[in-house]
Amino acid sequence: ENFSIPENISQKYAEWAYNRYSEGNGETEYECIELAAKEYEKVPETDSGLQKATCAVCNSCNSGYCDRFQGLVDADDDCDHIHADFIKKIYAFGYFLGYYNVENFDAKQIAQKLGYGLDVLQILDTI
């Protein structure tokens, strides 16, 4: 409640904070919560209002660097770290647009937000 993380995705960031705290690296529980809030702030929202997807483990692969795996990832191609039932790979006219968090959106809403017709979009699972 002290941070601006929307309720529908706050659980993901709470789990991230808990996992970090559980690593036992000397950070307090509250410090890990603050770090999770900073991770949320790093996640860019697209002009469409759909949120670009990030690694389900560290929440930062979208920037090209994965904290969890200590290495660079190619977020424009297949990122094995980005996986969840609400994360989709989206293509338009056969061209890769990116990974998007489409939780609470149906296919018609996704198409409208991205400005494409349903007939030209491919919305693929990442699991």
Image (cartoon, rainbow, N blue to C red):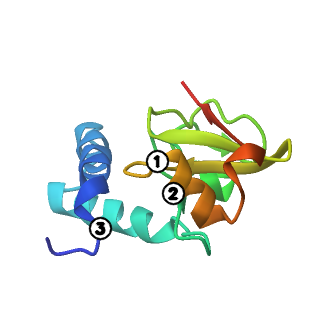
Q: CA distance from mark 3 to mark 2?
A: 22 Å
Residue designated by label 2:
109
Residue designated by label 3:
5
Q: Residue at x 56, y 69 (%)?
A: 44
Callout 2 amino acid:
Gln
- Tell me the quadrant of the picture where the C terminus can be found: top right
Of the two numbered discs 3 and 1 on the same chain, state the one appearing first in sequence: 3
Point out residue 121 in the picture as x, y percentages from the top left corner: 72, 45
Viewer-nearest residue: 87 or 14: 87
Q: CA distance from mark 2 to mark 1?
A: 5 Å
* Quarter residue 125 falls in: top right
Q: Secondary structure at mark 1?
A: loop
Callout 3 amino acid:
Ile
Q: Residue at x 52, y 70 (%)?
A: 49
Report whether residue 44 is seen.
yes
Q: CA distance from mark 3 to mark 1?
A: 22 Å
- The numbered dot on residue 22 is none
- The numbered dot on residue 106 is 1
* Quarter residue 6 falls in: bottom left
| Neighbours of disc 2 within 10 Å: few (<14), some (14-19), many (20+) | some
- Tell me the quadrant of the picture where the N terminus can be found: bottom left
Of the two numbered discs 3 and 2 on the same chain, state the one appearing first in sequence: 3
| Neighbours of disc 1 within 10 Å: few (<14), some (14-19), many (20+) | few
